[in-house]
Amino acid sequence: MSRVLVIAEFGASLDATAKCVRCASSLPGATIDVVVFGSGIAAVAAAAARLAGVTRVLACDSEANRNALAAVLAPQVARLAAGYTHVFAPSTTFGKDLLPRVAALIDAPMLSDIMAVESATRFRRPIYAGNAILTVEVEGSPQVLGTVRIASFDAVAQDGAASVESIAPDAPSITHTRFAGIAASGGDRPDLQAARRVVSGGRALGSADKFGLIYELADTLGAAVGASRAAVDAGYAPNDLQVGQTGKIIAPELYIAVGISGAIQHMTGIKDARTIVAINKDADAPIFEAADYGLVADLFEVLPQLTAAIKSRAG
Amino acid sequence: MKRIFVGIKRVVDYNIRIRVKPDNTGVITDGVKQSINPFDEIALEEALRLKEKGLADEVVVASIGPAEVQNQLRTALAMGADRALLVEATGIEPLDAARILLKLVEREQPLLVLLGKQAIDDDNNQTGQMLAGLWDRPQATFASKVEINGSTARVTREVDAGLETLEVDLPAVITTDLRLNEPRFVKLPDIIKAKKKPLETLTPAALGITPRSRVKAVHFAPPALRQKGIVVKDVNELVSQLAAKGLI
């Protein structure tokens, strides 16, 4: 029997959490609780209670938890972890920041980026940027901590009815780490990691100005915008749009790569996309090796055509 | 003495495309070029820049690994680190690496610890956070900007939602992301000079740490390959294909 504590992704979106719960559900005989941290989180806790397969939602609502500070949250998770066989968190920057600190506090082994569950103690995870898949067996520990690679799991349904309990774990008040602000990006467009469709541009766009063509197609499709590392390094797109090994790893239903050659580091980030479309004028670009649909063409010619064609279908 | 402590790991060079051994017991590392983990190199570069700005007096670089790690430590000394510590051990799990680093940190009493956010071999992204937790000090992970102001640091972090800024009391652990800086190239005279810089070798036992093996690697496999798709002749064909699959 597995007793699993899932740490909900910080903030309003439960998409990553729903995928994490799916991973937890694949443990043998799993009973799943979800803990939600934050300040003023009644609505998120209620939404978490609807995630299928969840038994209890623990709402840790406090002013101290207003921001996602690992130093503040880790002692609370460490308190809550007693009695659970597994503590999972999504492999987002939030989960990656927090869970190792928890592991240190409770002296438990931790696995990063779980992509498959083979048993209560055996898991698969990518190493070398996904160029090898490692199967690991945890031995000699009653507890396993793990971040869950959200691109590897589908979200659970939202037809559950878990109970919600307010809790306040006894943990020290931390003042050595202070939140000083966040510069969010993206605006009204869908979040890159949660989006069903993503349009990405590469260095071939040539300028930040011309990168606007990517936004036009993305907005027509209701898609999120991504960029290759080369495009980010050239200053055409902000860093948080970067898709790849050193950026975001995504798994949309439709991925359209425009003017992206397909360096290994980029391909690592899109391996799990259901359908990949590549538009590039170089017929030998490696991206075509992985693309479901390839169009060898000048992007400046075909991108406006594609945007217009999709618009006319929608219209 | 204001000291910055930097941890580095020796990994397969990032330009090498690794291959899984045919018997699935590991990846091929024999005869493969090994280098300082790129994120750790960025951590070292940041430490050197802070020292050059007069914000630190000494940069100490440490590594855990086999005796060959001396090569990477010498490179770090050639980049500008003042002295090096090597804890000779292999097969160390992240939490044990953090326990070993804590012992070194307690000995060195640094103002700041800088580590790469993750090693590009096992991609764990754990050690810095674990060290901060064991040390009971602040952590600022995935840093893209670091400013030291007396007894605090202001760190910009690359998080999923954008750029977050934290203020932390020192000492603290900062882990570095890719865009923090571009590491310098090593010059030949510095390589020669680095041979004379101190490099101390230790063992986990000498530090009072008994490494554990709680996460056993049982099987290595290459990733599943994607099937190559079709080439369409124009936008119209692309649109009708995508429409037929219900994707647009």
Image (cartoon, rainbow, N blue to C red):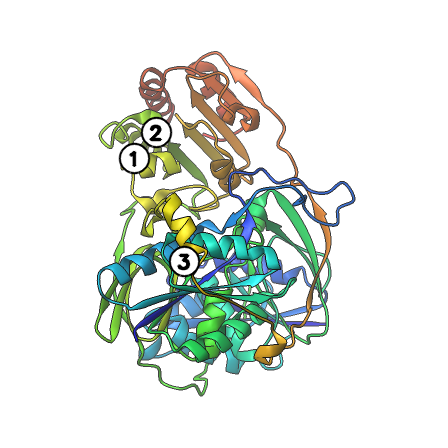
Q: Chain of mark 3?
A: A
Quick check: A66 above or below A231?
below
Q: Are marks 2 and 1 in contact (CB under 8 Å)?
A: yes
Quick check: A310 above or below A35?
above
Q: Callout 3, which amino acid?
A: Ser
Circle nearer the viewer, 1 or 3: 1
Where residue A82 appears, as percent x and y from the top left, is 59, 82
Circle nearer the viewer, 2 or 3: 2
Q: Are marks 1 and 3 on the same chain?
A: yes
Q: What is the C-alpha distance between the residues marked 2 and 3?
A: 31 Å
Q: Callout 2, which amino acid?
A: Arg
Residue depicted at x 56% and y 28%: A290
Q: Chain of mark 1?
A: A
Quadrant in the picture for the N terminus of chain A: bottom right
Where residue A304 appears, as percent x and y from the top left, is 31, 20
Residue depicted at x 35% and y 54%: B45
**Label drawn at residue A203:** 2
**Which badge, 2 or 1, is on the more N-terminal residue?**
2
Does B51 sit left or right of B235 as displayed? left
Quick check: A22 above or below B34?
below
Q: What is the C-alpha distance between the residues marked 2 and 1?
A: 7 Å
The quarter of the displayed image where residue B193 is located: bottom left
**Which badge, 2 or 3, is on the more N-terminal residue?**
3
Quadrant in the picture for the C terminus of chain A: top left
Q: Are marks 2 and 1 on the same chain?
A: yes
- Looking at the rendered structure, the secondary structure element under dot 1 is loop
**Mark 1 neighbour density, 10 Å: few (under 14) some (14–19) many (20 or more):** some
Where residue B231 appears, as percent x and y from the top left, is 53, 16
Location of mark 1 (residue): A234
| Residue A246 shows in this picture | yes
**Mark 3 neighbour density, 10 Å: few (under 14) some (14–19) many (20 or more):** some
